[in-house]
């Protein structure tokens, strides 16, 4: 004799089916998946082809005369900086792009059908979030593997297993923060055209604001202060700490500590938080705070809609 499913079990089963449905819709579009990965990899390619020498020269200019330099060691350092930027951009842009499924459901009336069905509203909301989070982790992890392969093949590998594991952990936290923020914002967007416009704008500017395209240290102070309010800035900072520390230690052998610290500050391994240097602990706090804040905001918005 079969026993009736408990309500929570029924809701979790429905949630898993909706997540699978959203994942299938996203990954069946091979072109969409390809272009989701293409944007950050284009940034890496442009850097390798055009910007690499510029960054190497900027490091050489920051080191006092008389200190012996290895161009290969400098190259590994700036390569690691750029890869950190690529990963931080990927978490944001992939998560934002994944919201096309949710917005398309609104446009086509699918979401209204879901809401009018016996499915609980929190299950519908959670399905979009979980699908987005899983998608962001998958594509960001593939991007990480490609970037690490580039480091290894170019001779710039100065990472330990711990560095790689903490980099992946940072992807998990960064993707969580990005997903909560982008799903919350996309909840107010009604058309796919509007979302496409938003994706285009954010993809174009976010790299500058979080210091992925140029070191934050060369930005105007006002822009640095604005950047210090963005969770993506702290995501990029954590990636830099785990990807660049080994390269910096190799490059900075025999250098005075103040020179090594200056190089770390120039390439934003510490974030300028209103005139104070924020280390890894503060970065984790800010990213975790963004997760907490946008979890609450999403809950209150969902509760408000439910009460209507």
Image: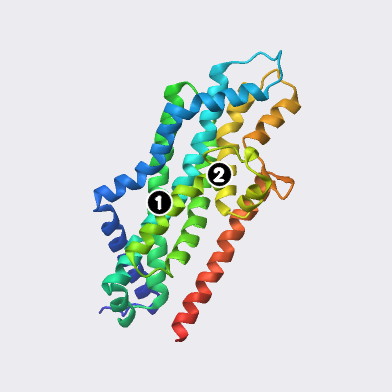
Q: Which corner quadrant holds the N terminus?
A: bottom left
Q: Give residue 94's mark.
A: 1
Q: In the visual, does 28 lie left or right of 225?
A: left
> Gap between marks 1 and 2, in whole Å?
15 Å
Crowd around label 2: few <14 · some 14–19 · many ≥20 (10 Å): many
Task: Residue 225: give x, y in percent of width and height.
Answer: 66, 51
Q: In the visual, does 6 lie left or right of 151?
A: left
Query: In the rendered image, which residue does mark 2 sit on?
Result: 236
Q: Which corner quadrant holds the C terminus?
A: bottom left
The image quarter containing residue 285 is bottom right
Q: Is residue 156 visible?
A: yes
Q: What residue do we see at 30% from left, 45% from top?
A: 34
In this orientation, which residue lies closer to the viewer: 190 or 168?
A: 190
Query: Is 169 situated above or below 242?
Result: below
Question: What kind of element bears circle 2?
Answer: helix
Query: Is 282 situated above or below 110?
Result: above
Q: How is the image coloured?
A: rainbow
Q: In the visual, does 277 lie left or right of 87?
A: right
Q: In the visual, does 260 lie left or right of 161?
A: right
Task: Residue 212: give x, y in percent of width and height.
Answer: 53, 41
Q: Is residue 16 visible?
A: no
Question: What kind of element bears circle 1?
Answer: helix
Crowd around label 1: few <14 · some 14–19 · many ≥20 (10 Å): many
Asked if disc 1 and disc 2 are in contact, CB closer than 8 Å, the reply is no
Q: What residue do we see at 67% from left, 36% from top?
A: 265
Query: Is 303 situated above or below 179?
Result: below
In this orientation, which residue lies closer to the viewer: 64 or 145?
A: 64
The image quarter containing residue 163 is top right
């Amino acid at each position: 004799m079969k026993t009736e499913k408990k309500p929570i079990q029924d809701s979790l089963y429905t949630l898993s089916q909706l997540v699978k449905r959203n994942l299938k819709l996203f990954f069946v579009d091979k072109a969409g998946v390809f272009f989701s990965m293409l944007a950050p990899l284009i940034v890496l390619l442009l850097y390798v082809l055009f910007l690499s020498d510029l960054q190497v020269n900027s490091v050489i200019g920051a080191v006092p005369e008389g200190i012996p330099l290895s161009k290969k060691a400098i190259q590994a350092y700036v390569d690691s900086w750029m890869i950190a930027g690529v990963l931080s951009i990927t978490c944001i842009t992939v998560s934002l792009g994944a919201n096309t499924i949710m917005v398309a459901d609104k446009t086509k009336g699918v979401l209204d059908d879901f809401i009018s069905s016996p499915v609980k509203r929190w299950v519908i909301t959670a399905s979009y979030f979980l699908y987005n989070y899983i998608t962001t982790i998958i594509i960001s992890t593939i991007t990480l593997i490609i970037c690490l392969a580039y480091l290894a093949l170019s001779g710039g590998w100065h990472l330990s297993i711990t560095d790689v594991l903490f980099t992946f952990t940072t992807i998990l936290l960064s993707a969580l923060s990005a997903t909560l923020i982008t799903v919350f914002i996309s909840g107010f967007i009604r058309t796919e055209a509007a979302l496409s416009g938003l994706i285009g704008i954010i993809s174009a500017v976010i790299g500058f604001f979080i210091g992925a395209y140029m070191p934050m240290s060369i930005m105007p102070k006002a822009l640095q202060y604005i950047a210090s309010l963005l969770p993506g800035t702290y995501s990029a900072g954590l990636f830099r700490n785990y990807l660049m520390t080994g390269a910096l230690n190799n490059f900075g052998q025999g250098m005075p500590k103040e020179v090594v610290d200056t190089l770390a500050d120039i390439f934003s391994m510490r974030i300028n938080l209103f005139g104070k240097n924020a280390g890894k602990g503060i970065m984790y706090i800010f990213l975790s705070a963004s997760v907490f804040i946008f979890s609450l905001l999403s809950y209150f918005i969902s509760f408000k809609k439910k009460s209507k």
